[in-house]
Image: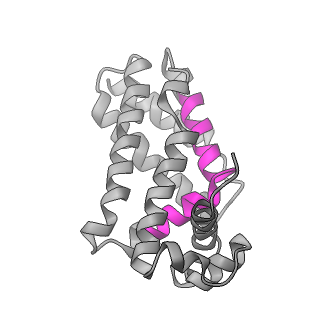
Amino acid sequence: MAATTRDRALDAAVEVLGAEGVRALTHARVDARAGLPPGSTSNWFRTRRALIAGVLDRIGEREQADLDPSQLPLPRDPGELIEAFVALLELQSGSFALRTRARYALFLELATDSELAAPLHRDRREFERLTERLVASAGIVEVVPTARALMALGDGLLFHRLTVDPALELRPPIERVVRALVAHD
């Protein structure tokens, strides 16, 4: 099915955010990036705030579709958990890097706007639940603290990979942390 004008605008807005940052997010830039006639984006999103709200929903929709928990194989042990987490971070810093950058930019931009940031926090909770599910499936007893530690590590690794060192090896630190958490379990 062909993407609607609205979807094209939102996907382009995510690209603008991920590639150029929050200050670059304008209706005109989104129209240009999407190859839409001038004014198209503002027909759907009258204000910048409405555009940001639309982008937040779009990021959540795309992540749900791309990272559908029901489609992910569940790890049966800590080794498979390491593999799953490395693969997830590879996606977030590879194929989905622009979207990840856009999400991080919005987290920072909206830190003091609880209403607009609500979808980001909702999506974060979904990712927490997914991580908890992976940890539990791997047979680790202390699910919540282990999941939180992995998520904190993942955020740091993603941030480093997206800003400083795109070639950063993910496996060594993830393996070290998982092995330490399992030994502590």
Q: Which residue is more in the foreground, 96 or 11?
A: 11
The vertical placement of 136 against 69, above or below, is: above
* Residue 39, percent from left and from top: 60, 83
* Residue 183, percent from left and from top: 38, 24
Write the residue at 57% across / 82% down.
27
* Residue 24, percent from left and from top: 58, 83
Secondary structure mostly taken by the magenta-highlighted segment of the chain? helix
Q: Which residue is more in the foreground, 159 or 49?
A: 49
Write the residue at 37% across / 41% down.
126
Write the residue at 44% across / 57% down.
57
Where's the C terminus, which quadrant? top left
Instruction: Check residue 8 for magenta coloring.
Output: no
Q: Which residues are magenta?
A: 82-106
From the viewer's perspective, tell me whether residue 148 is left or right of residue 67: left
Q: Which residue is more in the foreground, 94 or 106?
A: 106
* Residue 60, percent from left and from top: 46, 51
Picture quadrant of residue 160: bottom right
